Amino acid sequence: MIIDPALEILAEAKKLAQKYRVLTGKPLGITGEVAEYEAARILGVALTPARQAGYDATETREGKVFHLQIKGRCVLEGSKPGQRMGSIDIKKEFDAVLLVLLDDNFDATVIYEAPREAVISALTKPGSKSRNERGSLGISQFKSIAHVRWPTCNLSPTRQTAQKHGAP
């Protein structure tokens, strides 16, 4: 069995981040990188080189290359509702946004996907400074415009609907 060296390092970083959170009560700041690697591992998307403007991965669908922006959020048990995603720059090139939700072990629990048009519509809707100026959506807002990309085979339609509306 061939093991990806980056995944080995990431596994160690996840353990360190868990220890750091226990000691300090603060996150270590590796959620974005973990989310990208989890999406690549689970969905098979190809990660782009670092600092690629607009998107983090590509995937071929029906002969067309899709550009995917990947956002991650660690959702801890008992955490406050209303958590927000990282900023999305709608001026940059991307076809869809993936949101990878991670548990307290930094393992993916669910991956959502929303198309560019839905993301732009949600971000430009009048009324919220954080949404309009910072390009930041709440997790529940994102779920309302997205579909569950993974795990699809393990969830019944009822469970998928429950997850889309906030249930773990």
Image (cartoon, helix red, strand yellow):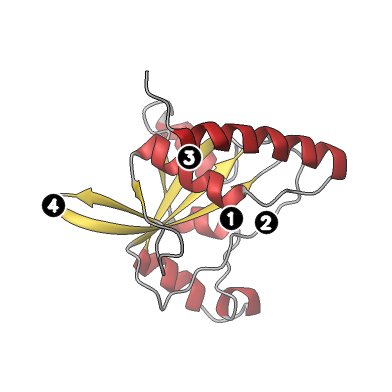
- CB contact under 8 Å: marks 3 and 2: no
Q: In this view, does 38 lie above or below 154?
A: below
- Tell me which corner region of the image, top left, top right, bottom left or bottom right, holds residue 56: bottom left
Residue 63: image tag: 4
User: According to the image, label 2 marks what residue?
Assistant: 83
Q: In which quarter of the image is the N terminus?
A: top left
Q: Tell me the amino acid under the disc marked 2.
A: Gln
- CB contact under 8 Å: marks 2 and 1: yes
Q: What element carries label 4?
A: loop
Q: Is residue 23 above or below residue 134?
A: above
Residue pictured at 64% horizontal, 80% vertical: 129
Judge left or right: residue 45 versus residue 107. left
User: According to the image, label 1 marks what residue?
Assistant: 139
Sooner in the amino-acid sequence: mark 2 or mark 1: 2
Disc tally is 4
Residue 38: image tag: 3
Residue neighbourhood size for the residue with mark 4, other residues' Cα within 10 Å, grouped as few (<14), some (14–19), many (≥20): few
- What distance separates the C-alpha of mark 1 from that of mark 3? 18 Å
Residue pictured at 37% horizontal, 23% vertical: 2
Q: Quadrant of the C terminus?
A: top right
Q: Tell me the amino acid under the disc marked 3.
A: Glu
Q: Tell me the amino acid under the disc marked 1.
A: Ile
Sooner in the amino-acid sequence: mark 1 or mark 3: 3
Q: Which residue is farthest left?
A: 63
Q: Tell me the amino acid under the disc marked 4.
A: Gly
- What distance separates the C-alpha of mark 2 from that of mark 1? 6 Å
Sooner in the amino-acid sequence: mark 3 or mark 2: 3
Q: Which of marks 3 and 2 is in front?
A: 3
